Amino acid sequence: MSAKVICITNQKGGVGKTTTAVNLAYYLAKDKFKTLLVDFDPQGNASSGLGIDKTIPAQLGYTMTEVILGSASLSQAIRPTKYKNYDIAPATPELANAEVEITSQPRKFVRLRDAIHSVADNYDYIIIDSPPSLSLLTVNGMIASNYLLLPVQTEFYALEGVAQLLESMKLIMKQANPNLKLLGVVATMYDKRTSLSAQVYNEIKKYFKNLTFKTTIPRNVRVAEAPSHGVPVGAYDKFSKGAKAYKELAKEIEERTK
C-alpha cells in the first residue's frame, strides 16, 4: 500500500484549513484507514489541536523542522495520537526559520516529497496541513501530494485568491508534479440562516461544478471549542453538527480517492 497524499491548502488564513485537516484525519482513522497528519504550518495549530504542548521542547522530540532540514527522518518525527490509526508529525514556529534556511539549499522544493516517500507504505492516507500562504512550504506540500483539498469559507471575498492558487497548482503540475489533482472544494463556516452563505456556496458550485463537495462544514461552536481541549471535534462532541459534517466529508473523500 502506498498512501494517498492530500494537501489541504488555501492562501487565506482563517478558512478552517487546520480544523479540516485535524478532523478529516480523525474520521479517516475512525474508518480504519491508517492516517498520518503532517503539520506543515509554522503556527503548529494542528499539533496543539491534538494536545501537543509545543512549549516543552524536551517532550517534543523531533518535529517537521528537523525533517525539512534533513537532520531527522520523518519516521523519527512521527508520534501516535490518542486515537487508533491516527499519527501526527508535529510542527513548531521554528519551522519558519527552517524554511528560510533551505531557500538557498539544493532540493529545496522536494524535501517534503522525499520525506513522505520514506513512510508512504505505512499509511493509507497522509494529510498535509500547509501554511496560509503561497510559500516554499506550501509548494513543498503540493509537490509531495496526489491531491489538493481546498477549504473555502462561505463569506464575502471567499473566492479571492483562489484563482492565484489554481495558477500555482497548474505551474506545479507542469514543472514538478504532473500527477497532482484538485480533489475538491469544501465550503466551510456555512451558515444556512444567511443568504450570503447560500449565495457564496452557489458561486463556488458554479465555478468548481462537480468538484464541490456536497458536504458543507457549518459554523459550529463545538468545532471552535474542540482545539482548546486538544481534541478533534468528533472526540469532543460526536453528536454536534460539525462532527457529523466532517464524518460525511471523510466518506466523500474516501469515495473520490478510491
Image: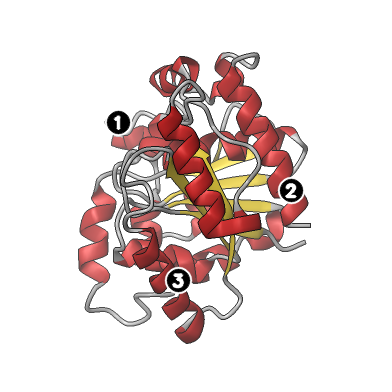
Q: Position of residue 136 (x, y in %)?
A: 31, 67
Question: Which quadrant: the C terminus?
Answer: bottom right
Please name whichever residue, 132 or 194, is drawn nearer the observer in this view of the structure. 194
Structural distance between the alpha carbons of marks 2 and 3: 22 Å
Q: Position of residue 4 (x, y in %)?
A: 67, 59
Q: Are marks 2 and 3 in contact (CB under 8 Å)?
A: no
The residue under label 2 is which amino acid type? Answer: Glu
The residue under label 3 is which amino acid type? Answer: Met
Structural distance between the alpha carbons of marks 1 and 3: 36 Å
Does residue 12 lie above or below 156 as drawn?
Answer: below
- Dot 1 falls on a residue whose secondary structure is loop
- Dot 3 falls on a residue whose secondary structure is helix
- Residue to which mark 1 is pinned: 56
Q: Position of residue 245 (x, y in %)?
A: 62, 29
Specify whether 215 is left or right of 223.
right
Disc on res. 155: none
Please name whichever residue, 247 or 80, is drawn nearer the observer in this view of the structure. 247
Disc on res. 254: 2
User: Would you say residue 99 is visible in this rendering?
Assistant: yes
